[in-house]
Amino acid sequence: MPERAHYFWVHPEKQRWYAVRVTRDLFGAWLVVRAWGSLRNRLGGERCDVVASPAAAAERLRKIARQRQRHGYLLR
């Protein structure tokens, strides 16, 4: 399992944010929940992906973190 189960990034120039959290649903399945939006208004979205295990969730988090860093987001 990752060190933290919730991550939050901000892109200062674009005034955008991106958040990821790992959780379980009512049936015990592991979920990676991603949300994104604007710091200027309430526009944004959310996506929920089911993963097989905590290890799969950790790998998904690593991929998302690398992608956010490549796109200029700063971890908060």
Image (cartoon, rainbow, N blue to C red):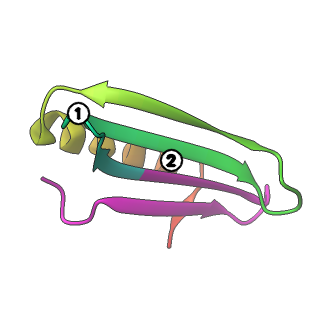
Q: Looking at this view, is 9 or 22 the one in front?
A: 22
**Residue position marked by numbered label 1 in the rendering:** 27
Residue 32 percent location from the top left of the image: 36, 39
Task: Please give the name of the residue rendered at 12% of the width and 34% of the height, measured from the top-left corner.
Answer: 53
Examine the image and state in which quarter residue 52 appears: top left
Which residue lies most toward the front here? 26
**Residue position marked by numbered label 2 in the rendering:** 68
Asked if residue 36 is among those painted magenta in the image, a careful observer would answer: no
Residue 50 percent location from the top left of the image: 31, 27
Vertical side of 76 occupied by 37: above or below:
above
Magenta residues (range): 1-20
User: Which badge, 1 or 2, is on the more N-terminal residue?
Assistant: 1
| 14 sits left or right of 49 in the view | right
| 28 sits left or right of 70 in the view | left
Q: How many marks?
A: 2
Q: Looking at this view, is 35 or 9 the one in front?
A: 35
Task: Please give the name of the residue rendered at 88% of the width and 62% of the height, measured from the top-left corner.
Answer: 40
Residue 62 percent location from the top left of the image: 28, 45
